[in-house]
Image (cartoon, helix red, strand yellow):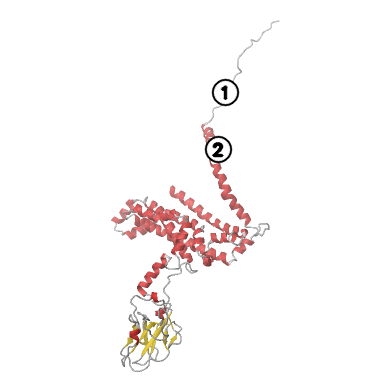
Amino acid sequence: MTVTLAKETTGPPPVSPVSPVSPAERARRSRRRARIVALLFVFPALLLLGALVVYPVLFSVGRSFFDASGTRFVGGDNYTEMFRDPATLKAVRNTAIWVVVAPTLLTGLGLVLAVLVEKVRWATAFKLLLFMPMAVSFLAAGIIFRLAYDDDPSKGVLNAAVVGVHDAFKGTSAYPTARARDGHGLTAEPDGSYRTSGSVPPGSSVEFGMVGVAPDSLPGDARSAYAAAGRKAAPDEANGVVYLDFTPGGGGQQGKVDRRESGLPKMRVDAVGDDGRTVASTTTASDGSFHFSGLKSGSYTVKLPGSNFAQPYQGISWLGPALVTPAIIGAYLWIWTGFAMVLIGAGLSTLPRDALEAARMDGANEWQIFLRITVPLLAPVLTVVFVTLVINVMKVFDLVYIIAPGPVQEDATVHATQMWLVSFGGGNNQGLGSALGVLLLLVIPAMVFNVRRFRRSQR
């Protein structure tokens, strides 16, 4: 029998061949690692976004279905109440006015200014000047315009300008506080004028004693009325004197012109006939004297018209119920016009100049170029600016809250201020306030549209 012994071998076991990794698999692994790294970098931002934006939005939506205390579920009652409340309806109406007017005016102003700035020498300085209000906070801007819109012309710069222009063309009364002394032959009329109690035939003299005027507020050319009071009238005329029936330092006799009593110059005096028509008019001299000559026989009434005693023009009530919203929109325009101008100017700088030059060579004027070439080419930029301003306008709060005085706060209220007032400004109904806040989510479609438009313009 033969035995065969196998030879013992030593060494490592055989290794099976490793299949190579395909390029597609390596690309997938690389993209997966890139996504993981990107997610790690974005995670802190996503965490903050969720804590500061997503969670408050979801909480507000849920809170809007509960009552003021937050303990009882009321369903859609807050939304129903929101559209039944007159103050909320007024806020929605004012917000609609803001959304329509402010972005339209700002886009138009920005377009016009961007085109005009290209044609001025100091374009950069002009842009900087118009953009500077963007550096002012809404709080500071609100305080500035609250003072500018003040009703008192000595404080409000706008009313000071309006009163100055008005007085330059129409003048103003020199004696707004003057009144006739009671029981001395003068009768007050409903229109604020004064007339003689009896008739005044030609050849007569009358004296109008007035009070209520401070001696130190008399015109600088006012002189003593004592000499004028003694003049006699000719047969075909009537004369008299208008004087301040007050003797400085005391003394004197009421209803009579004393030596130290001053005339009232530049006061209009009318002679009125029996038929009620004014037959003659004149103005008092520096000593308060006046006269009507060439009067026909008959009886007349001498009258001091109410315009002599009219209160001075106080300007426009910018912050009254009728104008408070336009006034606040004006302040908003002051702040944001530079923003619109700079953005539209950036788009304007990218326009193909050869198209503009070709239009000029074809005989088009600047107005035609603006309407038919510049505006259509700038349409994407104008849309982005307009939608951005719509989003901003729907959130406006600071200017309305600061500029509008307390009595007209309700007339100027917008959605954001109404939400704050209902929730924290005295209403203490955070359920209804949350329902109002949910309405602000209407800006989301505008934001989505703006983002898509921006992406298309980038392509």
Q: Please name the residue that numbered disc 1 is placed on.
A: 17
Amino acid at the residue labelled 1: Pro
Q: Of helix, strand and loop, which one carries label 1? A: loop
Residue in the picture at 35% in, 58% down: 370
Dot 2 or dot 1, earlier in sequence: 1
Image coordinates of residue 163 in percent, x first then y, are 39, 70
Q: What amino acid is at disc 2?
A: Ile
How many numbered discs sit on the rendered protein? 2
Is 172 drawn above or below residue 136 in the view shown? below
Residue in the picture at 55% in, 42% down: 44
Q: Position of residue 125 (x, y in %)?
A: 35, 53
Q: Give coordinates of residue 270: x percent, y percent.
A: 37, 85
> Tag 2, which secondary structure?
helix
Rate crowding at label 1 as few (under 14), some (14 to 19) or many (20 or more) other CA atoms within 10 Å.
Answer: few
Look at the image and tell me whether residue 396 can be seen.
no
Q: Position of residue 105 (x, y in %)?
A: 43, 61
**Residue furthest top as drawn:** 1
Q: Residues within 10 Å of mark 2 (few under 14, many from 20)?
A: few
- Distance from Cα at disc 2 to Cα at disc 1: 32 Å
In the image, farthest residue toward the right: 1
Q: Which residue is mark 2?
A: 36
* Image quarter in which the N terminus is found: top right
Q: Is residue 359 left or right of residue 254?
A: left
